């Protein structure tokens, strides 16, 4: 009798402890989740605060006190910026250069990646090693010589000059090469038997079969080109040739500092890429993983 | 059993011919001095276990593998250096290689589109082919939405639309389940009967080869073991390899001693001491170690005391298949498989005697060749 | 497959040509020119005389260069370890979430990374604004009641820029950590829990060792990335003393563009280039060794 009671006590203990731990786990887990959520809110605050400020009148902005929401919602900052600055030029410039860079990089990188992956030609290994090594070279270090080259080509202060150095994309070539490598040989043979030449193979089989990668790379290339500051800053001096990332730093109001307007123009600059990200979240994630995978 | 001794069946010049071809991969020689011919309109199977070179031969005919030495002829023309697209042949791959991003229609019409044919022609021809293969209602689907059998038919359709001189099949049924395989076999047979185009078919499955082909080329480690019709190979195997490969369940083999050879018959001593007579089919007078091969259906179960019994033993396993019964008997010659009637009444553990159908026994010499 | 070599070479040439022309013009030639230029006393545009290692000696003795190097190291030390660790911690939290909540939270942390640097500059310039910035509610009490001009206070400049950079770039590291965490099969955690391991122990014994390769990868990527810093420093330095907060890329640009000393600028660029290449190779070897383990 006593033995049974004793045994029950012994077995009850670990189970009770486990149950207690289970309950405790829940609380800790909940705490962690809560902290994460609060962290996200804190992290998003600066962006939110900047955005909200753009919808306030200037007098409200400089008023003491903390107002998380505009008392009087207004678009006047945006209107002013859209009408009084060269933002239209900047948008178009950014659009042209970003799209040009994206399209050119994708086509060139896919072609080169295909050639290295599928074709056999003299110097193939050499080119591949050169490309592999080149992503270690920091572009900012080449800025000076890029400037020299572009000015020798007479392309300073032109959109083409802005585009040129951005076309170096070894990582993109590497990614394409790896994806093309993974296409089963059967497809190549079947298409070859059907009479396809290499260009048809690339554009009708290999690229379409890897459409997701292309989309991801295109998006991230676009965002990178849109956001680029250093090179366009150096290469362009006249305001109407600037891209928007550079342009917004050049807003000098004759009326003195205007926080609302400065932020409004910044928000306008960020809007396209933010929208692209929010729509294509998964693709952006995929592209970042891919490029990090290359480096790792 | 060298390749040079392969027969050339058929009076007319062959439709497809590999003449004295050698294939080397670096320092490894996979195929050496092999000659293979395929007649026009025939269904020729290249049969053998993995690694025997059958796929390599097919790919050399297709132009997907370079021929290290030797030549390939299609319809009398030397195509050895021609790229695959120029050889007027079409291939069905084991994995089908259907372009996943294209519809069935686009897959089938791909070769036409590559050649720059107008859309109307492409669609018309694709429809034609789809009708033949009963794929009409699937023309706008993608391969991922199709079943295995349907995908197979699309692969065939893609080859069909090119109106090739010959079809090459690389183990096309191996990705299908058993039932589907039987169904597709029938369809392939029908296709061949309807079209009459030369078909070269690679497989490791002897049932497929036996049922589909009118000529089988059995390959063993890069060498042709025997060429012949299915029944020829079944009833008159040229060597032990072919005898063992063809037929299911496989032939029984055991060592025998040859006491004497008298013209077309040899007196042999079976394991266990019984004497029998086996036919001698060649002129070989090789009296050294020999093996006897006998198919399960040529062993008959009799009473253990039966005078005609040459083996005696205990029944180990009985497999009832419905239309036949397989009995595994432990004898002095090892475990022998006996095939009997479907309603054969025998139980595991019983002692039985085995009678030998001497006419259908095969003697194999030391080298494996039939005696 | 049988194919004519000639047609293959031709196809290859056509396909490779565009990329390679660009590559030659904007990569190979600039790299060579940069090295060559570093041995001359040329201005930005135009020829110059060969001076051997003169430029490099000048760099070694240039106080401003040492400041730039020191500031760069300082900045990297401030932003990289903290950024990486913070990203890991946040990843642990985000990884627990599921579905749309996770997507939203992830977007909140990641969105800054999508922003152009100038937008980040505006946002944080506003946050820290001396007169009306919301951060003054926190800073002023710490500054004896007076508003603080963060970017003009020399000791605060780098930490502030590092802080902002962490806010800006965390998303990238976060993504990689989350991917790495996802790769750890949940079964391992379940087994550990059955064995009685608590949360902290699970982290110590399972998560940390298994995520270590990713940690190293993220750390080295960020390290190499942040060594090239320029944009934020330049933007936040506008209107105040530039020299004190100089970083390496800034130094390069100053020599080459502002002082028109092409040769010297190139030399400093070569130094930066070498540092980064050495680190990249080290990273590659480190990861390879880890991978083989």
Image (cartoon, coloured by chain):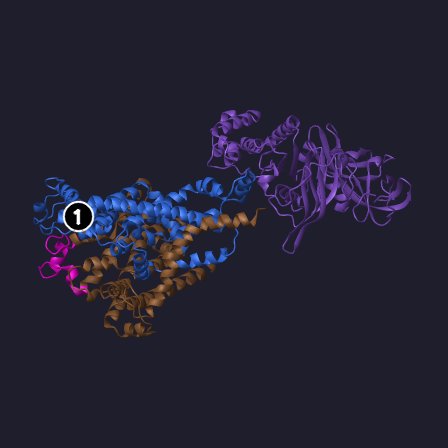
Chain colours: A blue, B purple, C brown
The percent coordinates of residue C153 (x first, y second) are 15, 63
- Camera-side residue: A27 or A265? A265
Q: Tell me which chain the residue with mark 1 is part of.
A: A
The percent coordinates of residue B15 (x first, y second) are 69, 36
**Left or right of C45 in this view: A202:** right
Residue C146 is a magenta residue: yes
Q: Which residue is mark 1?
A: A263
Q: Which span is picked out in magenta? A: C127-155
Is residue B295 visible from the viewing direction of this image? Answer: yes
In this view, which residue lies farthest toward the right?
A: B262
Write the residue at 32% across / 43% down. A281
Write the residue at 23% across / 50% down. A242
The percent coordinates of residue C82 (x first, y second) are 28, 59
**Left or right of B364 in this view: A105:** left
Where's the C terminus of chain A, which quadrant? Answer: bottom left
Mark 1 element type: helix
- Camera-side residue: B220 or A272? A272
Is residue C188 visible from the viewing direction of this image? Answer: no
The percent coordinates of residue A58 (x first, y second) are 9, 46
- Camera-side residue: C159 or C266? C266
């Amino acid at each position: 009798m006593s033995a049974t009671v004793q045994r029950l006590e012994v077995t009850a203990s670990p189970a009770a402890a486990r149950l207690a731990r289970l309950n405790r786990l829940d609380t800790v887990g909940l705490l962690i989740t809560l902290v994460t959520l609060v962290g996200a809110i804190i992290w998003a605050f600066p962006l939110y605060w900047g955005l909200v400020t753009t919808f306030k009148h200037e007098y409200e902005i400089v008023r003491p006190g903390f107002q998380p929401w505009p008392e009087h919602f207004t678009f006047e900052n945006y209107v002013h910026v859209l009408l009084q600055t060269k933002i239209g030029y900047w948008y178009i410039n950014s659009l042209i250069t970003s799209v040009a860079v994206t399209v050119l990089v994708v086509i060139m990188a896919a072609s080169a990646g295909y050639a290295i992956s599928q074709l056999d030609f003299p110097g193939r290994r050499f080119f591949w090693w050169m490309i592999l090594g080149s992503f270690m070279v920091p572009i900012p270090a080449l800025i000076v010589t890029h400037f020299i080259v572009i000015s020798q080509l007479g392309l300073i202060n032109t959109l083409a000059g802005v585009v040129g150095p951005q076309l170096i994309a070894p990582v993109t070539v590497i990614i394409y090469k790896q994806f093309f490598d993974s296409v089963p040989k059967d497809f190549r043979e079947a298409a070859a038997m059907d009479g396809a030449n290499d260009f048809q193979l690339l554009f009708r089989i290999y690229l379409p079969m890897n459409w997701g990668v292309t989309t991801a790379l295109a998006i991230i290339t676009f965002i990178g080109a849109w956001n680029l500051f250093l090179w366009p800053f150096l290469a362009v001096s006249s305001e109407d040739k600037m891209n928007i990332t550079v342009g917004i730093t050049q807003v000098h109001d004759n009326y003195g500092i205007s926080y609302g307007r400065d932020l409004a123009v910044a928000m306008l600059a960020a809007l396209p890429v933010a929208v692209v990200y929010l729509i294509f979240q998964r693709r952006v994630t995929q592209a970042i993983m891919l490029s990090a995978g290359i480096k790792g | 059993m060298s390749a040079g001794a392969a027969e050339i069946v058929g009076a007319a010049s062959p439709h497809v011919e590999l003449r004295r071809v050698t294939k080397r991969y670096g320092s490894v020689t996979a195929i050496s001095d092999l000659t293979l011919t395929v007649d026009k309109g025939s269904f020729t199977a290249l049969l053998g276990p993995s690694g025997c070179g059958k796929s390599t031969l097919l790919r050399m005919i297709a132009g997907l593998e370079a021929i290290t030495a030797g030549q390939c002829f299609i319809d009398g023309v030397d195509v050895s250096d021609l790229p695959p697209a120029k050889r007027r042949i079409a291939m069905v791959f084991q994995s089908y290689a259907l372009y996943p991003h294209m519809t069935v229609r686009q897959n089938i019409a791909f070769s036409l589109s590559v050649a720059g044919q107008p859309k109307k022609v492409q669609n018309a021809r694709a429809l034609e082919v789809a009708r033949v293969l009963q794929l009409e209602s699937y023309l706008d689907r993608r391969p991922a939405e199709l079943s295995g059998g349907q995908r197979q038919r699309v692969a065939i359709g893609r080859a069909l639309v090119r109106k090739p001189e010959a079809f090459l099949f690389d183990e096309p049924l191996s990705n299908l389940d058993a039932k589907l395989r039987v169904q597709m076999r029938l369809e392939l047979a029908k296709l061949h009967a309807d079209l009459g185009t030369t078909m070269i078919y690679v497989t490791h499955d002897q049932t497929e080869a036996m049922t589909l082909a009118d000529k089988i080329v059995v390959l063993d480690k890069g060498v042709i073991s025997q060429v012949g019709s299915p029944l020829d190979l079944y009833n008159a195997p040229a060597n032990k390899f072919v005898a063992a490969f063809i037929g299911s369940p496989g032939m029984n083999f055991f060592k025998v001693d040859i006491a004497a050879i008298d013209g077309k018959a040899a007196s042999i001593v079976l394991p266990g001491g019984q004497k029998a007579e086996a036919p001698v089919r060649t002129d070989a007078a090789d009296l050294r170690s020999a093996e006897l091969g006998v198919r399960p259906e040529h062993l008959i179960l009799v009473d253990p005391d039966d005078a005609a019994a040459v083996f005696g033993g205990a029944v180990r396993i009985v497999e009832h298949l419905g239309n036949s019964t397989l009995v595994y008997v432990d004898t002095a010659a090892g475990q022998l498989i006996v095939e009997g009637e479907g309603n054969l009444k025998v139980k595991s553990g019983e002692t039985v005697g085995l009678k030998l159908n001497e006419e259908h026994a095969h003697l194999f010499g030391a080298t494996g060749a039939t005696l | 497959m049988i194919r004519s070599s000639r047609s293959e070479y031709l196809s290859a040439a056509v396909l490779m040509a565009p990329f390679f022309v660009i590559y030659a013009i904007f990569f190979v030639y600039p790299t060579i020119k940069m090295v060559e230029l570093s041995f001359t006393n040329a201005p930005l545009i135009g020829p110059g005389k060969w001076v051997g290692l003169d430029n490099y000696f000048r760099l070694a003795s240039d106080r401003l260069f040492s400041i730039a190097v020191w500031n760069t190291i300082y900045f990297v030390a401030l932003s990289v370890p903290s950024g990486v660790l913070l990203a890991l911690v946040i990843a642990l939290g985000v990884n627990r979430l599921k579905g749309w909540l996770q997507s939203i939270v992830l977007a909140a942390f990641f969105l800054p990374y999508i922003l152009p640097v100038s937008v980040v500059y505006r946002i944080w310039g506003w946050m820290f604004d001396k007169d009306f910035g919301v951060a003054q509610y926190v800073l002023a009490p710490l500054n004896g009641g007076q508003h603080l001009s963060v970017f003009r206070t020399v000791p605060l400049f780098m930490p502030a820029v590092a802080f902002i950079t962490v806010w800006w770039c965390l998303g990238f590291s976060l993504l990689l950590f989350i991917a790495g965490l996802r790769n750890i099969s949940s079964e391992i955690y379940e087994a550990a829990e059955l064995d009685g391991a608590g949360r902290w122990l699970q982290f110590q014994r399972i998560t940390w060792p298994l995520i270590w390769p990713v940690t190293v990868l993220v750390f080295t990527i960020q390290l190499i990335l942040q060594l090239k810093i320029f944009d934020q420093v330049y933007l936040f330095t506008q209107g105040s003393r530039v020299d004190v907060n100089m970083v390496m890329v800034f130094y390069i640009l100053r020599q080459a563009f502002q002082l028109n000393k092409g040769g010297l600028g190139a030399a400093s660029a070569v130094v930066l280039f070498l540092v980064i290449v050495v680190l990249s190779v080290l990273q590659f070897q480190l990861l390879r060794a880890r991978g083989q383990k």
